[in-house]
Image: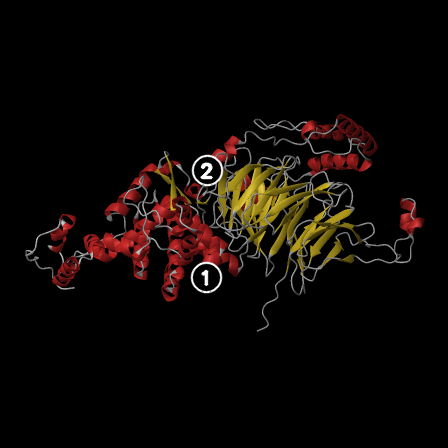
Amino acid sequence: MSAATPAASSSGGVSPVNASAPDVTQNVSSIDRLVLEYLRSRGHKDAERALNESLESGGVDESGKTVSAEDLIKTLAVYAQKPSRPGDNVLKESANVLQELTAMGNPPSIQNLIASLGTVGAEEILSVDPTDKEEGFRELEAWVEGSLDMYKPEFRPILFPIFCHFHLDLVQRGFKEAALRFYGTYSPSLAPMHHATLHHLSTLLLPSHVQNDDDAQRFKNEKYVIRMSRSGFSLLVGWLTEGVGGEASGAGDGFSGEKGKRGRAAIMRVVNNHLRFDVTSASATAVSPNAWEESTGLLSQLIPQTSASATPNPHAFNASKGELKLGPAPISEELRAETERVIREQSVLDRDPNAQYDLQFLRPPAIPGVISPTESDMLPYPQSFKTVDVQREVEKVRDARKRIRLEPSALSSVDMNSVQGGAARARGLPSICAYTLHDVGEGAPCCTFSPDLTLMAAGFSESYIRLWSLKNEKLKGLRNDFSLSSVKDSGSLSKIQQKEGNTTRKLVGHSGPVYSLSFDPLGGSAAPPRYLLSASADATTRLWSLDTMTNVVAFRGHQNPVWDVQWSPMGIYFATASRDRTARLWSTDRTSCLRIYAGHLNDVDCVRFHPNSLYLATGSSDWTARLWDVQRGACVRVFIGHQGSLSTLAISPDGRYLASAGEDLAINLWDLGSGRRIKKMTGHTASVYSLSFSAESSMLVSGGADWTVRCWDVRGAGGPGKSRESGVTESPITRTIDDENNETSDLLATFPTKRTPITNVHFTPRNLCLVAGNFLAPDSR
């Protein structure tokens, strides 16, 4: 369009109708002015009026005007604002586009169009340079590592969510090479704490992968909570806004220059849009270094909300659920009296005058501050007791009397290489008996021992179960040619048993790998178990009779593989954990489940009953553990602090502590009463598969994929470890642990195997430790 020229004065008079026309023609081009004069001279008033209106609305020539960056963004991006938020683009986040358009009354066709465009925010248009994220993260990491030691534990958790968002943004925008370069450069420093998540992120290489991945969408749509002290938060805000201070000498020069400003802007976008800071009034030195990660993560869906506006906080949720009844389960007076009578008669027969003192174990002293349940609180059980119940209680008393007292504290003040070290190890460490499976083939995912230590069972990937007699006794099943009418009592049952037997039996019935096994605990250590439960990838849980060596019932209800199964301490009831994100309660007298415990966001990998049967603990791939009220089906505790999937749980015999472990290589010890983490124990170099407490709850034993068995002091303070002085022979895989120096001081001893991942550890009531695993043959190549 040519430059605007002043309009010449009209020779004719101006009609009243077009009195304002000369004002318009003063600012239009000569061509437009000639057109207006032609229309006026011909009397085309409607056409003249329409052209005038067009020139008034957009006829000003702006060819020489510079467009501002803000106007450019508004022009290129989908822009809308609300009266309550002037100047702010309410459509800058793709997650809110449909909601805002619905509120503005746009038709569905426009909503679908905008949704298909993906992120159309104004801020996103100016952030397409992948080097901004690399520069920003480099400066942030340098600042964190260059900060004071007292602030490093609370600053380091912020690196992980920012890394995840940067990597996902690069992939979603199609910068595959930049994403791979960014991942390769900065992921190694985060791998020790977040190995599982980082490995998963490395598999997302296309924008469609990000759009269809649940974990990626959780990062995009949820706020990542970071716990930080008030002083630490002030330092972080100051660095983000001012861009100076904190980095190590020579590591960086702050956010200086144009490139640094863009890097700061990239970090600020993540901080503003995807992070939520839980600022505590406690000073940085008043909080344990490991405690900063306890309430960190994507918490909005992990914690059941008591109100819609409440900020996700596991401590507030746990406190709102009140006190728990963690004391021992009550015993009926009739059963207690009968047990005392049997113990007195046995002491007379054995001529043991000290046996009268065994009765004290029937009435253990109450633990201060721990509430014990009453009989009305318990799950429904048969009113009358049986002979096996008396035998079980009598054997508990004998086990308590003959128990080996472990004193882990004796190892803390003694040089293990001295003469006194051998005596201290004998007092503080248990005897460990290891069972190794050879020539397993495709593997044995699980092993377990019967409570009376007469049987061991293993589940195999080939869909079968194998039993072994640990006393070298013959395991006999029933003959194939008997009739049910011939079975009238236990005597007739023994007549139809097989004449010949073997010390091992194979149980076939599942159509998928067997992932978990659990022996019937009703007889305790006094009598062999009568039943065995098995969980499998075929989505069933099967009940096996050990009298007939056959499958009795198949429990169906889960729609996905069942990862774990466990009996309640008193039998009858059992719980299962499944890939369908639920745990379920069952009883042996019906085939349908009694309760469904739903709330985890991912697979429920493991279940454990509290010793008094009132509560059920679950561990999940969503990195959390939960404690459920068995009867009400309500979640009463949430435990957040792991940085990977949980694979095993253990509850102490005194009912006060929960130990959890998994793929993040750490063992967390929790106080069930408050729901708070007591300490974090590290030392394993691969996933932890199994945990078990000693009878006094003073020691914890763990086994894992690093081919080791480790003993931990439950009552020790923990903290950074010291150089090993125990003199225990180390394997090469174990020596790498000392080199990395990630052992905490509460690690008492490490017992390496040659090449056997430990899939099960089991403390007996007398504090003998049994472990089992399948040997991994060296690669023939």
Q: Nearer the viewer, mark 1 or mark 2?
A: 1
- On the image, the x and y values in percent for residue 665 come to 51, 51
Q: Residues within 10 Å of mark 2 (few under 14, many from 20)?
A: many
Q: Amino acid at mark 1?
A: Ser
In this orientation, which residue lies closer to the viewer: 219 or 454? 219
Q: Amino acid at mark 2?
A: Asn
Residue 51: name its quadrant.
bottom left
Q: Which residue is mark 1?
A: 208
Q: Secondary structure at mark 2?
A: loop
Q: Residues within 10 Å of mark 1 (few under 14, many from 20)?
A: few
- Which quadrant would the C terminus be assigned to in this image? bottom right
Residue at the limit of the structure toward the bottom, as seen here:
781
Residue 141 shown left or right of residue 327 in the figure: left
Q: Secondary structure at mark 1?
A: helix
> What's the CA distance linking mark 1 and mark 2?
33 Å
Q: Residue drawn at (65%, 61%), measured in percent from left and top? A: 443
Vertical order, 567 against 349 (above or below): below
Vertical order, 635 against 706 (above or below): above
Q: Which residue is mark 2?
A: 313
Residue 592 shown left or right of residue 655 in the figure: right
Q: Are marks 1 and 2 in contact (CB under 8 Å)?
A: no
- On the image, the x and y values in percent for residue 341 come to 80, 28
Residue 495 shown left or right of residue 124 in the figure: right
Residue 775 shown left or right of residue 41 in the figure: right
Residue 27: name its quadrant.
bottom left
N-terminal label among 1 and 2: 1
